[in-house]
Image: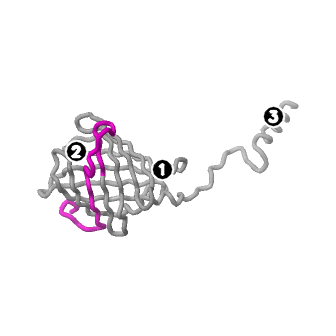
Amino acid sequence: MHHRVTFLALSFALLGPGRSGAQQAPAPQGPPPEASQFDFLLGEWSVDVTSKSHGTPPRYHGVWRAAKTLNGLGMVDEYGVSDDAGRIVYAGTTLRVFDTKTATWTMRYVDELGGATGRWSELVGVKQGSEMHVEQRGQSPDGRTTILKIRYYNIQPDHFSWSADRSSDGGATWVPEYLRLEATRGVSTPSSK
């Protein structure tokens, strides 16, 4: 009996005053204000792309769609572009999550190029002034590690600009504005129908 009383007293002491034996989930909190840094992407955008990529047209058009997920801490966006004949040039999906511990955006991106899927990239993003800056690391179709330094800028309610400098040699040399994109909110293009 003495052991049972000691055990109960110890149990209550460990649980502390006012607690029950079951752990309660933390009270839900809304996302921090920084989790809205990519909110300008929400909705549907018509995009015009200029490319220096070999094997793709120098200009193409498409649609970029984004929606919130993960109780406001994340975003999923899909991007697809076609040439003037309506053939898909490139498509991809990004999961963006705001990391509350590091105050950065952690992202995973997968693309489809010419019918091949599964090329995953890791991305990290931060807000710098009025711009969003992202570094993307992944594999090119020929197996080389590539780095893109991406800027989202000229951000307005109905427009934003996007550019990416590219390195295929670990950052030793760069192709400036390897890709450049102009996005206009909600304008229908032939590839979005």
- Residue annotated with mark 2: 113
Say which quarter of the image contains residue 77: bottom left
- Read off the magenta span: 164-193
- Residue annotated with mark 1: 104
**Callout in the foreground (2, 3):** 2
Real-space CA distance between mark 3 and mark 1, rounded to the nearest whole angstrom:
46 Å
Instruction: State the SS at label 1.
Output: strand
Where in the figure is residue 32, as x and y percent of width and height? 54, 58
Where in the figure is residue 103, as x and y percent of width and height? 51, 51
Q: Is residue 3 left or right of residue 24?
A: right
Q: Nearer the viewer, residue 10 or 37?
A: 37
Residue positioned most to the left: 85
In terms of sequence position, does the residue under pointer 1 or pointer 2 come before the other?
Answer: 1
Question: Which residue is at 16% across, 53% downward?
Answer: 58
Can residue 128 be found in the magenta stretch? no
The answer to whether residue 155 is above or below residue 149 is: below
Q: Is residue 116 left or right of residue 77?
A: left
Question: Which residue is at 25% across, 52% downward?
Answer: 179
- Residue annotated with mark 3: 7
Q: Residues within 10 Å of mark 1 (few under 14, many from 20)?
A: some
The quadrant in which the C terminus is found is: bottom left
Residue positioned most to the front: 172
Real-space CA distance between mark 1 and mark 2, rounded to the nearest whole angstrom:
28 Å
Residue positioned most to the right: 2
Q: Please state which amino acid type lies under the numbered disc 3.
A: Phe
Question: Which residue is at 21% across, 52% downward?
Answer: 51
Question: Which residue is at 36% across, 57% downward?
Answer: 152
